[in-house]
Image: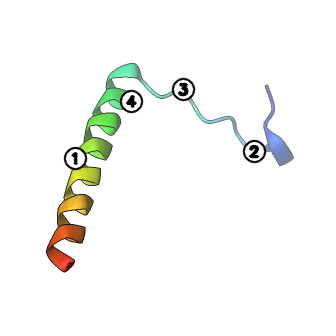
Amino acid sequence: NIGVNNAPVPPPIDSFVQQQINNLNIQLQAVQNNVQVLQQ
């Protein structure tokens, strides 16, 4: 399976790694919300 412009197709992300990414994104969003409150 060839990608656009013969670019290598990225390997599928492991489900455990994807879950960890999701958890970090949730934590990041919470931190960003706290920063916005502090900046007010």
From this view, report whether residue 8 is shown above or below residue 13: below
Q: Residue 10 sits in which quadrant?
A: top right
Q: Which residue is mark 2?
A: 7
Q: Sequence order check: which comes first, mark 3 or mark 2?
A: 2
**Nearer the observer, disc 1 or disc 3?**
1
Q: Which residue is mark 4?
A: 18
Question: Do residues under tags 1 and 3 come within 8 Å of each other at their CB atoms?
Answer: no
Is 8 positioned to the left or the right of 35 in the image? right
Q: Which residue is mark 1?
A: 27
Residue 25 image position (x, y, % from top left): 32, 45
Q: Residue at x 26, y 53 (%)?
A: 28
Quadrant showing the N terminus: top right
Q: Sequence order check: which comes first, mark 2 or mark 1?
A: 2
Identity, as a three-letter code, of the amino acid under mark 3: Pro
Q: Residue at x 34, y 38 (%)?
A: 21
Q: Residue 35 sits in which quadrant?
A: bottom left
Q: Which residue is mark 3?
A: 12
